[in-house]
Amino acid sequence: MSSFASDEQFVGLIRQEQTGTSLQDQVSRLFEEARDDVYRYLLTLGLYPPQAQEAAQEVFLRLYATQRKGEEIQNPRAWIFRVAHNLGLKIRARQHSEEPFNPDVATPSTTQAKTPESQLLERERMTRFHAAVQGLSEQQRRCLFLRMEGLRYPEIGVTLGISASAVGEFLRRAMVRLKKVRDE
């Protein structure tokens, strides 16, 4: 009987080891697919780049630890953004100041081939657009940024703790406001 018990334990250990490797592969694959999206989202919350990079890694470490405990996550992408959102807000609360928008940094390098006049117009357009985005409510901005990262309304709702219909309304209002700026 003791041989049977040790065989069962051995098979259980092998299965656990196989599951751990599979879990590590799953988290690694998800990390490769979503890390840039999570990083950009954390930047939109106002984190400095080094903090956003560290927080993005922390999110995936938490995913691995949570799944290793055996907790089932129905929608890993939505879960990742929810954790990133909460962690980003905590980190941002500890920050003392936020850097103001710098249109020179946000302007793509491809504009160098354009004329100085077109560069100026493009910079002014980007400044107006950025000001319009900053003029949106916090919820509208968060919904907009998560939608830009490819999350669907229900996933955004889960991430922010609001209903999918509220997400739709926030996005509609944000788009109306941004279209006004575009058409000016």
Image (cartoon, grey):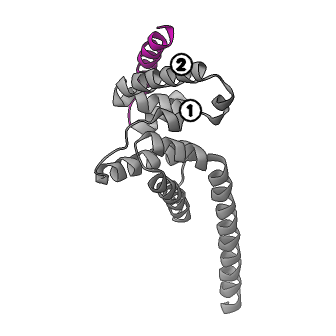
Q: Which residues are magenta?
A: 161-184
Left or right of 74 on screen, residue 170 = left
Disc 2, SS: helix
Residue occupied by mark 1? 107
Q: Quadrant of residue 133?
A: top left
Residue 123 lies, with reference to residue 9, above or below; the image says above
Q: Which mark is residue 121?
A: 2
Q: Which mark is residue 148?
A: none
Q: Give how far across and how far down residue 61 sits, in percent.
A: 53, 62
Assess disc 1: are there few (<14), some (14-19) or many (≥20) residues with their C-alpha within 10 Å of its C-alpha: some
Amino acid type of the residue tagged 1 in the rendering:
Thr
Q: Quadrant of residue 109?
A: top right
Residue furthest out toward the top: 183
Q: Give how far across and how far down residue 96 sits, in percent.
A: 28, 51
Residue 12 lies, with reference to residue 111, above or below; the image says below
Residue furthest out toward the bottom: 2
Task: Give whichever of 148, 157 is nearer the camera.
Answer: 148
Quarter holding the N terminus is bottom right
Disc 1, SS: loop
Residue 79 shows in this picture: yes
